Amino acid sequence: MRQTVLSIVLIVAVIGAGWFTYQFFTGGPSDEELSAPEGIDEQRLAEYRKIKTLKPDLSVFTDPFFKSLFSPWQVFDPGAAATPTAKPGRPNPFAPF
């Protein structure tokens, strides 16, 4: 009888220690940790509204100066084959001299 009671107490203690360890290491943050300071939500909402109402000025693309700009790739013909100006190297560059 004494051995049975000791076994039950030991099992309850092990289960209790396991439960406590699980709660301690995997428990979620408390409500105090999750709550943001006052004013943060309102500040973010105001910034979001400010960004949402931005309208970009697209008149830059119709400016004559912008239209006069060109890409360096427009100067070259992309369909033309490139001719190598350098002499090619050895057939096997890793072969000893």
Image (tube, rainbow, N blue to C red):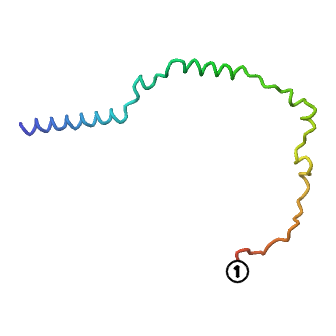
93 or 44: nearer the viewer: 44
Residue 58 vs 75, above or below: the answer is above
Q: Is residue 25 left or right of residue 42?
A: left
66 or 76: nearer the viewer: 66
Residue furthest toward the bottom?
A: 97
Q: Label 1 amino acid?
A: Pro
96 or 39: nearer the viewer: 39
Residue furthest toward the left?
A: 1
Residue 45 vs 18, above or below: the answer is above
Q: At 91% across and 30% down in the image, what residue appears?
A: 63
Q: Is residue 9 left or right of residue 24?
A: left
Q: Position of residue 22 (x, y in %)?
A: 32, 35
Q: Which residue is mark 1?
A: 96
Q: At 14% across and 39% down in the image, what residue appears?
A: 7
In terms of image quadrants, where is residue 71?
top right
Q: Is residue 75 left or right of residue 56?
A: right
In terms of image quadrants, where is residue 87?
bottom right
In terms of image quadrants, where is residue 3?
top left
Q: Secondary structure at mark 1?
A: loop
Q: The C terminus is located in which quarter?
A: bottom right
Q: Position of residue 13 (x, y in %)?
A: 20, 36
Q: At 59% across and 20% down in the image, what residue appears?
A: 43
Q: At 70% across and 80% down in the image, what residue appears?
A: 96
